[in-house]
Image (cartoon, rainbow, N blue to C red):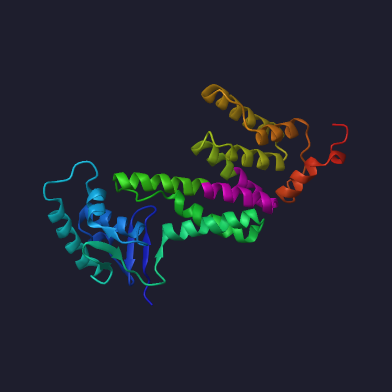
Amino acid sequence: MAETRIQLCGRLIVILAGVRLEDRFPARQGRLVFAFLAANRSRPVTREQLVGALWPSKQPAAAETALSALLSKLRRVVGGEVLAGRSELQLVLPADALIDLEAASEAIHRAEAAVTRREWATAWPAARIALHTSTRGFLVGIEGQWVDEQRRLVHDLRVRSLEAVAATALGMGNHEILSAERSGRILTEIEPFRESGYRHLIDALAARDNIAEALRVYEQLRVLLRERLGVAPGREMQSLHRRLLEATWPRSPTGSADERISASARPSDHGSS
């Protein structure tokens, strides 16, 4: 069967039955309408919703007429069997059609569930799929109010993906620790008030025996929260800080994160330090 694939993250790409079509769409508004329908393809979309997506602040005098003309042009490109309905519209795609945002959303759910179960081999590819897609951003080069709203959702998907990648990399240990460090650093940059990024970064640095840098990262968070919000890091971060100060981290980057944390929690492992 010929490929049907829609890319909503990054630049819009539309392949229907093996044919690349997005450049044939009626200008910017045609791409916007198709993308809106693709992002909401699980439910029918009313003409009123499409008018709102096209003209969110001020509608033209003949908005319905303009929408009808736009939909007619779009149907000539994709086919009436794909763009179905009149008062309510919906994309009808083959069962094996791939929409990247849908695949990424499903992947992050699989990854997070696998992380909870500590099934690292399952979590790793799912988290990477979600991260690869969400990092591209939503509909590059296309603007609109609903696009901005969707971009916030994709940003959240990226954050969750980075957290899943970092947690999985720490769980796998060994050479994957660097992936946890990279993900942690990105998280602290794009979500500076979200403690999970600092926690993953500190875990990765400590696993690589870089205690001084781990302490510096904690201090960065502590100062940020104090100066901007007037609060201290949470209990988990404070506990992590105490373990760093007590030098309870094993001195080898091998083994899983769970093994390292368990080792740090055993009093017999602390010795006189």
Residue 208 makes an appearance in the image: no
Q: Which residue: 68% across, 54% down?
A: 172
Residue 246 picture location, percent across and down: 78, 31
Q: Is residue 40 above or below residue 193?
A: below
Range drawn in magenta: 160-181
Asked whether residue 162 is drawn in magenta, I would say yes
Q: Which residue: 47% across, 56% down?
A: 105
Taking depth in this image into account, of 16 and 34 the one nearest to the observer is: 34
Q: Is residue 259 above or below residue 46?
A: above
Quadrant location of the C terminus in the rendered image: top right
Residue 182 picture location, percent across and down: 58, 44
Q: Which residue: 36% across, 57% down?
A: 39
Q: Main secondary structure of the magenta part?
A: helix
Residue 255 picture location, percent across and down: 74, 51
Q: Which residue: 60% across, 37% down?
A: 198
Q: Is residue 119 above or below residue 154?
A: below
